[in-house]
Image (cartoon, grey):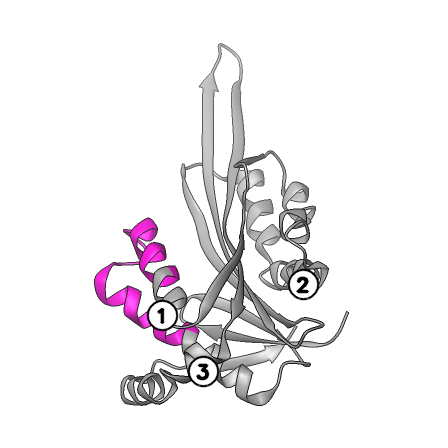
Amino acid sequence: MNKATGAIVGSSLVSLYDGIGRQDREDILDCLSHAHAFASRYHDQRDDYSNWMFRYRTRLENRGCILVNPILHTPQVIFQASDLDAVTFDIIDSAGSRALADLAGASWRSLKVSGHAKRFFRNGSRDGELGRFQMVPCVSDSNGDVLLLICAIRLTESVDTRDFDFWTDTRREMLLRISGGVYRFDRAVYAGYRTLIRTQLNSNADRAIEQFPI
C-alpha cells in the first residue's frame, strides 16, 4: 500500500495517500474543516450526533463532494476485542475502491480502539458509549479524481449482570455501527468557494493542526 499521511480535522481522522497533489490536499482539509465548523454552529456533536452529521454531510455535498455510493452496514454485535481487530471494511471495498478499504483499515488500526475494548471486556461495569469516530480516507483513482470516504463509526457498550445464589454472571457486548459513503471531490465546484472558506478558517483558527504518518 502507498504511504499515507494522517491529519486531525475537528473530530475526524483524515488520511491521504501521498499521490494526492498539494492543492487537492489543502482543499480537502479546508473543506472538511469548514463543514465541521458549520455543523458545530448548529448542533453539539456529542449530544446531537445524528443532526450534527446531517449538517456536516450536507455542507460537504454543497461544497463539491458528490456522493458516489452510500455505505450500507447492518449494526454488528461485538463479543470480544478481537472482533474489532477483524473489522475488514468490505463494505467500502464493495463500493469499488480497494485502496479506500485498505486506507480505512490502516486508519482504524491507528486509532487503537481495540485497547479500549480489551479493558471494557475485562472489567467494564457500565452501559454507555465508547466513542464516535469519523475517518476520512482519501485516494486518487486511475482517472485522477479524488475519492473520499466519509466513515462515521459509533461503538456503544452494554453490561448485563445477573446475581445467582452462589455466583454472579456478567455479560458484556458492544454494538458497532458504520455509516457514511464514498464521495468524489469536484474540484471545479469547490474552487468557487475556496477563497471564502480559506478566509473564514483563517479568521476562526478552524484548520487542521496535527499531521502524522499512517
Residue 152 placement (x, y as % from top left): 48, 54
Label 1 is placed on what type of residue? Ala
Kindly identify the residue that appears in the image at 53 percent across and 33 percent down.
Answer: 173
Q: Which residues are magenta?
A: 32-57
Asked if the magenta segment contains residue 42, the reply would be yes
Q: Is residue 196 magenta?
A: no
Quadrant where the C terminus sits is: bottom right
Q: Residues within 10 Å of mark 3 (few under 14, many from 20)?
A: few
Mark 1 lies on residue: 35
Q: CA distance from mark 1 to mark 3?
A: 16 Å
**Real-space CA distance between mark 2 and mark 1, rounded to the nearest whole angstrom:** 24 Å
Residue in the image at 38% along x and 72% along y: 63
Q: Of label 2 and label 3, which has the lower sequence position? A: 2
Instruction: Kindly identify which numbered label has been placed on residue 106.
Output: 2
* Residue labelled with disc 3: 209
Spatial CA span between label 2 and label 3: 21 Å
